[in-house]
Image (cartoon, grey):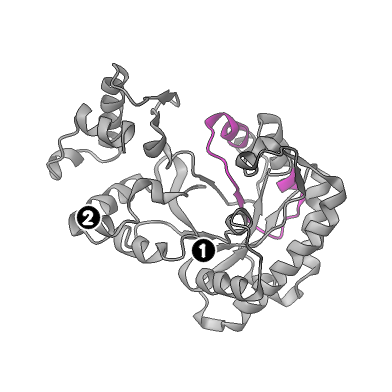
Amino acid sequence: MFEYVASGLSHTRVTLDRCSTDLDVQIIIQDLVSSIQDHYNHKFSVLYNAYAESNFPIHFSRVFGNKVHTIHSDSGGLQVITQGKQFTPELKKQVYDNQAINSDIAMSFDEIPVKTISSNSAKVTAKNTKIFDPSLFEHCARKSGQNLKEQVNLFWAKGDTRRAKILPIIQGNSIDNYKLWHELLLESIEPEQYSILGGRSISTAALGMGIKEEIERIIAIESLGKEFNYCHLLGLGSIQRFLPLLILKQNGFLKHISLISYDSTTHTANGSLGNYFCSSGRHIDVGKYRSPLLTFVTEDIFTNINNFNPGFFTRYNIDLTEDLIYYIICCP
């Protein structure tokens, strides 16, 4: 079983008051979400940033109702860094409280063992400006373990009022790195608190983003042990990078893993970037100007939605036109 987790939902506008408080919008979106659940052995879930998007759960409850499988929450560590702020105890508690009450799956604060190789401040957050720094590895792993301990203790103290389970993030640049990071993380918490962990989240931030790296990530999951049956793959929005997971899973890898989730902001950002992923997997740059591609995109959307939800457009009297697609994708 797979779980697709849509992140960066501000790009979809559903977190705006004018959308989330509109009853017609709520009905339509909940119908759409219900229609795609369990297709192609997939669940559909959503993710928000508990630091920068702390009010999103309010909009989620209105727009999605109970139709999404789970709500995931990111700790927002990257946003804290890029805003030049510090991880103060007060800030951490604020994030942890939000995660514990408003989400089902809560990511931990992690430290990434990479260094920036560009002096251009505009590129500081770009993945291709960072490389793995082995001298930072143990320090980052132990610091992440300390963060995890604080998060676990706060969640544990909430008792029955806590909703979420924690998903610690595992970093590494090799299979041995991943195993060592995992060991150092678990050293930070008491064995009786392991039950508060929902699984493991595996990152490639220090590894890379190619197909080879995806295969290594899958092998790393296999080597981390059999005590958990759920894992999350951070930042996996590429069909090409998903294929190794699908093939290896179907050929006997990860037998002990019953649920694999993965998140992507790339897909949800398409409406803001003028891009479209068609049902065949082709990526289309629609651009800012009208082109014959709009006809293809419109027909593909119509066909794809009707395949999942027959009669959808008639039921809600929605006239899907090239003009509508142009205004949404080309000039949002």
SS class of the residue under badge 2?
Answer: helix
Q: Callout 2, which amino acid?
A: Ile
Q: Which residue is found at the position 80% from the left and 52% from the top?
A: 179
Q: Earlier in the sequence, mark 2 or mark 1?
A: 2
Where does label 1 land, which residue? 50
Judged left or right of residue 46, residue 218 is right
Magenta residues, start to end: 220-247
Q: Residue at x 29, y 34 (%)?
A: 307
Mark number, residue 195: none
3D distance between C-alphas at marks 2 and 1: 26 Å
Task: State whether residue 230 appears in this view.
Answer: no
How busy is the neighbourhood of tag 2: few (under 14 within 10 Å), some, or many (20 plus)? some
- Pointer 2: what residue? 27
Q: Residue 50 appears at what percent x and percent y?
A: 51, 63
Q: Is residue 239 magenta?
A: yes
The reply to whether residue 56 is in sight is: yes
On the rendered structure, is 322 left or right of 286? left
Q: Residue at x 15, y 40 (%)?
A: 318
Q: Secondary structure at mark 1?
A: loop
Q: Quadrant of residue 129?
A: top right
Q: Nearer the viewer, residue 296 or 88?
A: 88
Residue type at numbered disc 1: Ala
Q: Is residue 181 above or below residue 328?
A: below
Q: Residue most toward the top?
A: 292
Picture residue at 73% right of the left edge, 50% below the top? 171
203 left or right of 40 in image: right
